[in-house]
Image (cartoon, rainbow, N blue to C red):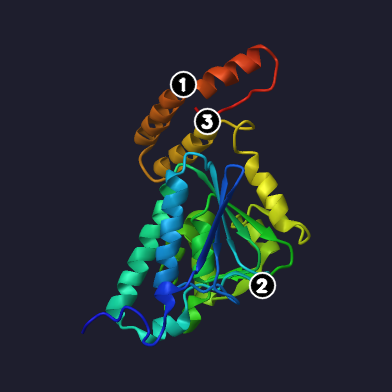
Amino acid sequence: MATTMQPSGTSESTKKLINYRTDGGVAVIEMFDPPANTYTYEMNRQMDEAILKARMDNDVYVIVLTGSGEKFFSAGANIMMLASVDPTFKYYFCLHANEMLLRLEHTPKLVIAAINGHCVGGGLEIAMAADIRIARKEAGKIGLPEVNLGVLPGTGGTQRLSRLVGKSKAIELMVTGNTFSFEEAQELGIINDIYEKDGFMENIMEYAKQFCPPNKAAKAVGGIKRAVQTGWEIPMESALAVERENQQLLFQSEDAKEGLAAYVEKRPANFKAK
């Protein structure tokens, strides 16, 4: 059976589904398909392109992921799309989503998920590929309810959630399919922080910019992420080698010299991401 690439009669391939902008060293990638920002193959392709764009931009040091509007970060995969395509397409759709989120996870730039609304199913799977997750207070629910559709969280959910909360708790959360509050998610370690509704994105941007030069040595931030992400599941000896190699690269940087000099001279460092 041939793979169905798109539901018939749509013009989605020409529709803008991702908004991208930069501001003071921060790239903002916004899922843009209101009201629920559900993702399709075409949205994922556009998001993948935005991730690569931010990765390759030497003036971008932090990536912020968010959803358009105030109700949803993302409700996950577009169910109408999934209902209209065959199993072969669904498999490759999941494979591409895995590759896209791994690309995000492997990018040596800090990634922050600004969870501005409901974050369920594939929406949470996207957020879990970020390094830090910050939610807007009382903006919605979070969870992986795919079991209620007769399927599992198929774009990294089973693996990333278990690594965040442990195997037993992850299994419980996924087999019940319940959604829960951002406060509960913070207690479980899924969310790092919760910000007030007013000025949410402004505060997110202020938070993100602290990791950009001259405030922080962006190469060191990226090196920390790289060492943790790569070293997390390999033997300790190999993980320490990854850490060592990243450290050696940083020792050779101008920012390391500036940081040490500033410490000795008792002054604020002026980092340049070099």
Q: Please give left or right for residue 164 compared with residue 180 in the image.
A: left
- Asked if 24 appears above or below 141 in the picture, the reply is above
Near mark 3 (Cα within 10 A), the count class, few <14, some 14-19 or many ≥20, is: many
154, 38: nearer the viewer? 38
Q: Which residue is mark 2?
A: 71
Q: Which residue is mark 3?
A: 273
Instruction: Check contact, mark 2 vs mark 3: CB within 8 A.
Output: no
Residue lying at the far front of the rendered structure: 14
The percent position of residue 8, horizontal first and vertical second, equals: 36, 87
Amino acid beneath label 1:
Phe
Near mark 2 (Cα within 10 A), the count class, few <14, some 14-19 or many ≥20, is: some
The percent position of residue 225, horizontal first and vertical second, equals: 49, 41
Amino acid beneath label 3:
Ala
The percent position of residue 218, horizontal first and vertical second, equals: 54, 34
Instruction: Measure the alpha-carbon separation of dots 1 and 3.
Output: 13 Å
Pointer 2 or 3: first along the chain: 2
Instruction: Measure the alpha-carbon separation of dots 2 and 3.
Output: 36 Å
Looking at the rendered image, the quarter that the N terminus falls into is bottom left
Pointer 1 or 3: first along the chain: 1
Q: Which residue is mark 1?
A: 251
- Asked if 188 appears above or below 108 in the picture, the reply is below
Q: Residue at x 77, y 58 (%)?
A: 196
Q: Please give left or right for residue 99 compared with residue 88 in the image.
A: right
